[in-house]
Amino acid sequence: MNWDETGPDTDTDQRLVGSGADGEDQAVEAALRPKDLDEFVGQEKVREQLDLVLRAARARGATADHVLLSGAPGLGKTTLSMIIAAEMNAPIRITSGPAIQHAGDLAAILSSLQEGEVLFLDEIHRMSRPAEEMLYMAMEDFRVDVIVGKGPGATAIPLELPPFTLVGATTRAGLLPPPLRDRFGFTGHMEFYEPAELERVIHRSARLLDVEIDVEGAAEIAGRSRGTPRIANRLLRRVRDYAQVKADGVINRDIAAAALKVYEVDARGLDRLDRAVLGALLKLFGGGPVGLSTLAVAVGEERETVEEVAEPFLVREGLLARTPRGRVATPAAWAHLGLVPPQQGQGGSGQQGLFRA
């Protein structure tokens, strides 16, 4: 119900539990997105604070302050930007940081904005530096300087802009320079969802998709959704397919569990890649420590795929730890895969154990 933004340029979009949005997701999400703050599930603090910002702006008859939304992919940043535009009764323009590589690209967008329009800039931390510096003045003074000509004869022509609201979204807030962060009037950090909140998301989406699901079926899907609404809705659609083909179309706990077993999503939300990484770490390297490149070769994936796609969730779940010496499995990882950790000094712990007699 609340989900958005594409993730890094890896194969995460091809995973059932990946947080990127593919073409099917985008089409379905358009129908499932909440239209106002009252419909939006979760993110209680951000929603309450944002409601105050928007109500105050409407009472003053002014445009809303610039808004920065940060958090992992799939938590609702794009959805909230659309809600901001709807609450302010304003049009919305959507673009992304990687699409703005020159100051002229940004100037063209800014100069075509209408008064009060919402400009949603996804992955704002990936915008080019010249465009970023132009954005400072646009946000603060609602004007930009367009450079005409080159060299000594270059002339700066000031261009006045209508008041607008910039909504920036980022998955890596730490990469934003302080001068840019400081120009946002409101900053909201999106948290991962609790299972109870995801159950509400699933029940709402099931109604909109005309899918019959009971409380236990929704709980089963929510528990495997990695705290992310977009993933919850994706799993719901795949379980719906299974229920229609293999059962009577009604989703209960058994049907949900059987469907997600087919799609290789286990009870904790790990998929094939996650389990391959853990399995290699435990079975081949005795739980670590092992270097990232070695671990990636062992599972037949690129280093970036393991680091950006599999590791964040494994670390968040307490199954894997990053240490200066390499990746290390936690006791919870051994328990999750049903394996017994080697005893200390028995030659099975870490890469060093590979060379013991």
Image: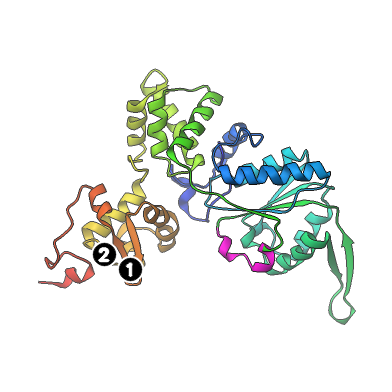
Query: Seen in the image, is 227 located left or right of residue 104?
Result: left
Picture quarter with the N terminus: top right
**Residue 178 shown in magenta:** yes
Q: Give 89 or 248, whichever is nearer the viewer.
A: 89
Against 104, residue 319 (above or below) is above
- The reply, left or right, for residue 71 in relation to residue 330 is right
User: x%, y% of residue 352?
Assistant: 20, 71
Mark 2 closeness class: few <14, some 14–19, many ≥20 residues within 10 Å: many
In the image, farthest residue toward the left: 357
Residue in the foreground of this view, choosing between 201 and 306: 201
Q: Does 238 sit above or below residue 110?
A: above
Please check the rendered image and state whether residue 110 is part of the magenta-colored stretch, yes or no: no
Screen quadrant of the C terminus:
bottom left
Q: Amino acid at mark 2?
A: Gly
- Image marks 2 and 1: residues in contact by CB distance under 8 Å: yes
Q: Is residue 294 above or below residue 258?
A: below
What kind of residue is marked 1? Gly
Q: Which residues are magenta?
A: 172-181
Residue linked to disc 2: 288
Among numbered discs 2 and 1, the one appearing first in the sequence: 2
The residue furthest bottom is 152
